[in-house]
Amino acid sequence: MRLPCDSTLLVIDVQEAIDDASWGPRNNDGAEGAIAALIAAWRSEALPIVHIRHDSLDPRSPYRPGAPGHRFKALAQPLAEERIIAKHANSAFIGTRLEEALDEIGATTLVVCGALTPNSVEATVRHAGNLGYRVFVVADACWAVDKLDLDGRLWPAADVHALSLAHMHGEYAQVVDSATTLRAAALANARRRMKGR
């Protein structure tokens, strides 16, 4: 995995709403720890971060503005200088300034983490891939929940997560793990420092 020095970390919907009991059982309990490590690495390496916040239009949603769940989780709290893009749809590109913000950064490569893998993460990744971005999805820094299919079969969150990653890998993105990504981020900044000499 080789990251250019414009590699932008996209942190999707890491808000308190995702802990609402209505979502049901999830997988990957360590995802938030991996996300926190990615954010810390991007900050320490002075690489760009964009936080995606879901502003639901559904008055019953825990993601609606004004609801307690609308807040970012403490581990993913943006700094004052970091960009926040608010969205209403699953894809963070629909009805937002995300593409413009990425153009301003000069981003060509996105590293994606957050929730939920088959929802906003996958929708955003597919969109980004179709727009021509090089995309990496950090598998252990996102998660899914149990899903009931149309035949009434309940699919465990781990299976939902794995299938969503399989949909994205190869066509829209490359699926990686956080350890590999952290090493690549450090190397990207090292290359940038070398260029600056």
Image (cartoon, helix red, strand yellow):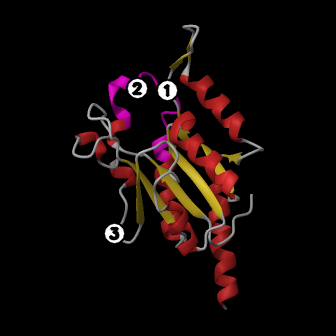
Image quarter (top left, top right, bottom left or bottom right) of the C terminus: bottom right
Q: Which residue is mark 2?
A: 23
Q: Residues within 10 Å of mark 2 (few under 14, many from 20)?
A: few
Q: CA distance from mark 3 to mark 2?
A: 30 Å
- Choose the circle earlier in sequence order: 1 or 2: 2
Q: Is residue 28 magenta?
A: yes
Q: Nearer the viewer, residue 81 or 187?
A: 81
Extreme residue in the front direction: 95
Image quarter (top left, top right, bottom left or bottom right) of the N terminus: bottom right
Extreme residue in the right direction: 170
> What residue sits 50% from the left and 69% below the top?
44
> What residue sits 49% from the left and 53% below the top?
11
Q: Is residue 147 magenta?
A: no
Question: Does residue 26 lie above or below 126 as drawn?
Answer: above
Q: Is residue 26 visible?
A: yes
Indicate which disc residue 80 carries. Answer: 3
* Residue contact at pointers 3 and 2, CB within 8 angstroms: no
Residue 97 appears at what percent x and percent y?
A: 47, 62
Assign a secondary structure to mark 2.
Answer: helix
Three-letter amino acid code of the residue under disc 3: Ala
Residue stretch rendered in magenta on the structure: 18-33
* Residue contact at pointers 1 and 2, CB within 8 angstroms: yes
- Choose the circle earlier in sequence order: 3 or 2: 2
4 relative to 89 in the view: left or right: right
Residue 29 appears at what percent x and percent y?
A: 48, 33
Q: Which residue is mark 1?
A: 145
Question: Does residue 17 lie above or below 188 as drawn?
Answer: above
For residue 142, what is the image quadrant? top right
Assign a secondary structure to mark 3.
Answer: loop
Question: Does residue 177 lie above or below 40 as drawn?
Answer: above
Indicate which disc residue 59 carries. Answer: none
> What residue sits 63% from the left and 53% below the top?
128
